[in-house]
Image (spheres, coloured by chain):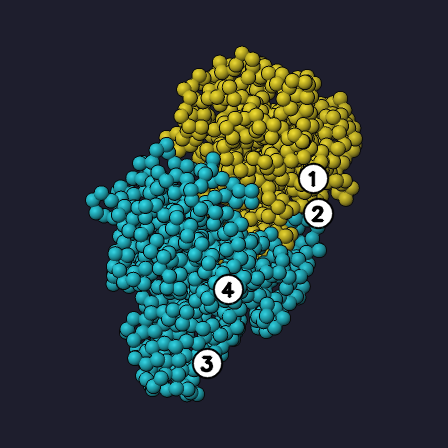
Chain colours: A yellow, B cyan
Amino acid sequence: MSRYAPVPFPDVKLEGKFWHERLETVLTRTIPSQHKKLEEYTILDSLKLPQPPPPLRFPRHANGFTVQVFWDSDVGKWIEAASYALAHRRDADIESKIEAIVDDFERAQAPDGYLNCWYLGREPEKRWTNLRDNHEMYNAGHLLEGAIAYYRVTGRRRWLDIMERYLEHIYSVFGTEPGKKRGYDGHEEIELALIKLYYLTGEKKHLDFATYLINERGQQPPHYFDIEREAREGGDRNQPYTQGNYEYSQSHKPVREQDKVVGHAVRAMYLYTAMADLAAELNDPDLKRACEVLWDDVMETKMYVTAGLGPSERNEGFTHDFDLPNQTAYAETCASVALIFWAQRMLHLDLDGKYGDILELAMFNGALSGLSRDGEHYFYANPLESDGRPTRWEWHTCPCCTMNVSRLVASVGGYFLSTAEDGIAFHLYGGISTEVEVAGTKVGLREVSTYPWDGDIKIHLDPATPTAFDLKLRIPGWSSGAKVSVNGETVDVAQAVNGYLTINRTWNKGDVVSLELPMPPVRLYAHPGVIMDAGRVALKRGPLVYCMEEIDNPGGRVQRFKLPRQAELRAETRPDLFDGVVTLKAEALAINEADWTSLYRTNPPQEEPAVLTALPYYLWANRGQGSMVVWVPEAH
Amino acid sequence: MSRYAPVPFPDVKLEGKFWHERLETVLTRTIPSQHKKLEEYTILDSLKLPQPPPPLRFPRHANGFTVQVFWDSDVGKWIEAASYALAHRRDADIESKIEAIVDDFERAQAPDGYLNCWYLGREPEKRWTNLRDNHEMYNAGHLLEGAIAYYRVTGRRRWLDIMERYLEHIYSVFGTEPGKKRGYDGHEEIELALIKLYYLTGEKKHLDFATYLINERGQQPPHYFDIEREAREGGDRNQPYTQGNYEYSQSHKPVREQDKVVGHAVRAMYLYTAMADLAAELNDPDLKRACEVLWDDVMETKMYVTAGLGPSERNEGFTHDFDLPNQTAYAETCASVALIFWAQRMLHLDLDGKYGDILELAMFNGALSGLSRDGEHYFYANPLESDGRPTRWEWHTCPCCTMNVSRLVASVGGYFLSTAEDGIAFHLYGGISTEVEVAGTKVGLREVSTYPWDGDIKIHLDPATPTAFDLKLRIPGWSSGAKVSVNGETVDVAQAVNGYLTINRTWNKGDVVSLELPMPPVRLYAHPGVIMDAGRVALKRGPLVYCMEEIDNPGGRVQRFKLPRQAELRAETRPDLFDGVVTLKAEALAINEADWTSLYRTNPPQEEPAVLTALPYYLWANRGQGSMVVWVPEAH
């Protein structure tokens, strides 16, 4: 089988209602407002060097937020998101804002190429002394991703040139050659960015340095973080999650030997993304095997039903198997976004629907829940249950998630389909059009659907000349009874292999493939190891996980409901809600809260018949405060 | 009604099996082993002044524990517990150990009376500069309680003299008089200790200083903690839970205006204990009313079913209404012990069974769970659910709970009954004998029962001469269908007022009162506000809350069980378990874990009939690691 590669997002036009709305919101609301926030919270000021050194390490601004070592990365991520936006439509205002930022970075860059505004502005003599905690390469990675995106869209090289000078500096400091430091960053990110640069330029040195970073990670003794810690004077600040805790940064052992997903969730996902990239580029079976083992570990024991990752605020990451508390779930938006990156890489290592399923699950649930309907409010943590207290915030002292979700949505078209020399593979559905080249022929493609609200999908093919190639359709793992036909002629879906149905034929102009994915609402049950979900049930329809919100179920906390196991789940189209969504309804039981006068009682709660309404999880907390639950207590 | 006062524990002999076992364990195992731990963890060394100043503020010992500012208090609490033990039987070895500690304190005491080994040993110039965080008066309070207990049992004054000198110093520094600091401690404790000293000596200055501390607390502006913070040089260490957070230490407003239970749970309970004491001593209706409002707040919205208090590790305390997570419950042992203190004070303000019920609930559940069966292992946090990871520890960097539970058990007889001029009131049952004086007559009393395992209680009265007085029996709030008779003649239990049945008659030698408290196992349900307990049920029999442990329910995590609402609960006497306990059994349903191959699935779990076994909660985690649950998912 020839190798599949994603069709880049600028080539994919989002025509379906679902993604069109999200994209327009991000383009018109999110990206402009994020620039305002970068200004308002002095993040852009921090690039204007030289600066007077502040008295404290993390000075607190009047707005209550502190200056952070990772602000460069937030700027880089905004440039990346804004550049993706420019790919949809150019915008002189956005471009001038990016150019102004590039001006600042250009002025800030040291003569030797070094470029980190925290260190240059505050403690230039301490650069490269604490890779473990201080995110220098992480920042560089995000700046590089921004530079690549900006160059790809505008063709302007200035920002990319700056970053390439910075990389030359980094390559002169780190590596296995004598005299160089054998360091790597505590927060992985630059690895996957370097591979992107390699894809852009074809220059092998970038791939080589990414390989060096992946290979060096976790080698010991001595451990690099110990070497640099010993070299630092005066002891460290209190860093309980990095000091001696290598699992936190996935550097507890060489990556090829890692078999359990550990530590900070976002770091882990960025690492695994780069590992999967390299496994493909280097054709490295050990690296691929490590990716597969780690994938299985997270899927079998550590992922929320929403594709949220990392239950614990304490380490922003993973704990032990089946530890998936709902109300206190951390499940950082960034981690689900990064899971999408990883899943996409795995999918292109092996065209297996199990990766596509998770890519889709994370997209529609754990990642998208991080962005409000209005495009200007966010969740950093994505709990699966609420007593009504959490609300979306408009900014965060660590604003990583905001730009992660905007760059994802602004480039979402890039996840829909892939091509190989002899085939086209559809991973996602939802209404797109594009033109690709397959088997030497230009093929126009138009996928028409109202997915995820409905599973009736039509794919119109328009090859320049009749051409034989594979059309591969992902048959989602959640679906049952899918039907496929070509020009009205049935294709046996049972022939699908690893979640993809391959249709090989000579395609002609006007061919129409019909894919019907029945979307009955279903119940999900969690492994008994997830003790938090004991006696509870989650609802799902198609790729969407549902939740109950108080506003749709007035009369008290939504946890007062019990859903009988036999109750029919009814999908209901609601044109009035968020411009049209499908809710779920069921005849359930509900406790009357007014009946309670004490904290505990022996008298059983009186459950009365009540209709339960559930809404897609990603839409929660857009209509004021109120309780919410994904895992509903079950009666049976 | 004349005022009731507790019969002191040395006058109450514990004859019933339940408390006899706990007491013997504490006397023979816990108190001696705690002294060993105080040695082993260098706590006793810290009293041996002068000491070389350590390089860091909280140096870490080889054993991994840090030196703490509150170590004096732990020594004080051990002396108190050990003195209570001496009241049961004198022990030359224990006495010499206490004397050796007194020697150290005597040598350490400053010429002006100041006595705090942390400050004297490390930073004597900084004494009384940070009452907010550094526990100076808290330490003094516990040392004072130790001195009072030791004096009461042995008649030896040396230790009490030292403490009285220290108090004179404190009184010279703090107060409302010109030139004095208007301070009070961030961690309440000394207030209740001073009232004990007033009871011992009758010297009003001690009551007055306790009153001063209570009255001054929370007065602002300016807030005392701000005044002292501004006076400190060089800024504070990072203290997120005390810096500007007055609720943490219940100093956010004057105590008489407080109406919500907030902050650190143990601090709150010690404060309320002293407030209730003072409300009685000063006959202060505002203080009494504040106690009642705070009592209702905690009872209606903030107490675990086990009488655990304070859900959050973050502030070791209270959060918001109905926030009672089970697996992560902090529910510090000390807080339940201190709730017993508070309940006892409330009970003696108003002889109301609602206070007795909570005193009993905390005793048998949230407090007693902190001590292992072997008497040498502890819980600091007392979760109500476990995935099998938590285990009891043999010591803690903050060992407050260890001596709190030993001093409680060593003095538990003091909670059983009270006397007034004209009456005797029984609060607890479990097999005791004593002699009291009522209406000018000595009355021998013997309460015979196997409570809490059985509710058949006989009280034998033996007045020196036939005498008329009230015999008040607490009819527990959890009971239903209680029967009482005197010499076989029925007394109408419906006459009970506020949970106490008063029998007024002329009592004669050989009179026998019979109290039958039926103890059918019952189900408890939590208010729907406690979203963590939605769809779950707890089991209770008499005063004992039950839990399921994996060892009694082998085959997987206990959360796999569902208890049908209609299933009969059967009490079963198990002479083989812990020298005889009553377990509960029910025909339930259980999921087969082996049936699961994925984290989530649409196929409903197959529940099969299985017998569920529950054990009293206080006994959990005494037989190795395993899952545990108090709130069992319910089927119906």
Residue furthest to the top in view is: A111
Q: Residue at x 61, y 68 (%)?
A: B577
Q: Quadrant of residue B582?
A: bottom right
Query: Is any atom of residue B99 visible in this view?
Result: yes
Question: Can you identify the residue that label 4 sits on?
Answer: B27
Inter-mark Cα distance, 2 to 1: 35 Å
- Nearer to me, A216 or A356: A216
Do the CB atoms of the residues marked 4 and 2 lie less than 8 Å apart? no
Q: Residue at x 69, y 42 (%)?
A: A296
Question: Can you identify the residue that label 2 sits on?
Answer: A481
Residue furthest to the left in view is: B178
Disc 2 or 1, which lies upstream in sequence? 1
Query: Is any atom of residue B256 visible in this view?
Result: no
- The local secondary structure at tag 4 comes to helix
Please name the amino acid that badge 1 sits on: Asp
Depth-wise, is mark 1 or mark 4 nearer the camera? 4
Tags 1 and 3 on a common chain:
no
Q: Which mark is residue B458?
A: 3
Question: Can you identify the residue that label 1 sits on?
Answer: A259
